Image: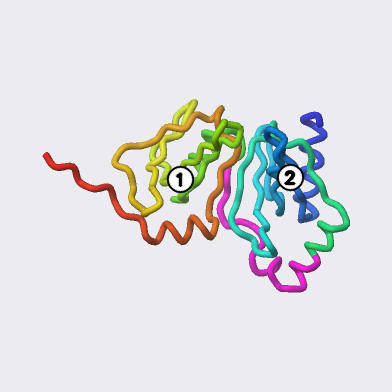
Amino acid sequence: MGEIEFINKAEKHIVQKDVVKVEREFEGEDLGIYGFLLGASSQLLFVQVDYDFQLDGYAIIPAFTVSKLRCNKTDRFHKEVLKKEGIFERDYGCDSSIDLTDWPSVFKSLKAIGHIVSIEDEEAEETDFVIGRIVRVNKKSVSIQYFDGLGQLDSETTRVYYENITIVNFNTRYIRTYSKYLKEPKKKDV
């Protein structure tokens, strides 16, 4: 799909508030995302994720990872169910403005809002996953204050290069829940 065709198709789905499947495939594995497109640029797509009839946070993905934007009869029926359940009216959209120009602008937007993010490289041999606070936004990378499975924040930051990012998530139920229980870094004995 060419860049202009991609942008035009994305804009159509944004205006119509369609439920779409953003088809993505890595190493033969289908990593499609269902939801509503909320924004698009030549480089990035902004998706409100729909998981089992719950709008569960947001994903930003590079356009180059998208093979197709699908909106078929099943997707349109899914949107009708969301409407009839009152989910669409209650939860659709995003209160925050995210600049989709490029990765630095995305992370500057998210940092200004104070969102905790998860970042993945799904193309890596073993998927790389970093979750935490945005500390610094650079030209080629973002630095994250990672937290582990016990909610312990690292005292050092983890640098993630933009070229290795295939998806960024924020404001998911998982992130919101964990965020309530984060522990500041342990003080080092001097």
Residues 63 and 166: in front is 166
Task: Specify the segment rendered in magenta.
Answer: 80-98
> N-terminal of the two: label 1 or label 2?
2
Q: Which amino acid type is marked by label 1? A: Ile
Q: Quadrant of residue 179?
A: bottom left
Query: Which numbered tag is attached to residue 162?
Result: none
Whether residue 95 appears in magenta in the rendering, the answer is: yes
Q: Residue at x 83, y 59 (%)?
A: 76
Residue indicated by mark 2: 22
Q: Distance between the residues labelled 1 and 2?
A: 23 Å
Q: Which amino acid type is marked by label 2? A: Val
Furthest residue in direction bottom, as rendered: 85
Q: Residue at x 46, y 61 (%)?
A: 177
Residue indicated by mark 1: 131
The correct choice, above or below, for 73 with respect to 167 in the image is below
**Image spot of residue 39 (x, y percent):** 68, 45
The correct choice, above or below, for 55 with respect to 100 in the image is below
Q: Residue at x 55, y 37 (%)?
A: 127
Q: In which quarter of the image is the C terminus?
A: top left
Query: Image check: 111 left or right of 31?
Result: left
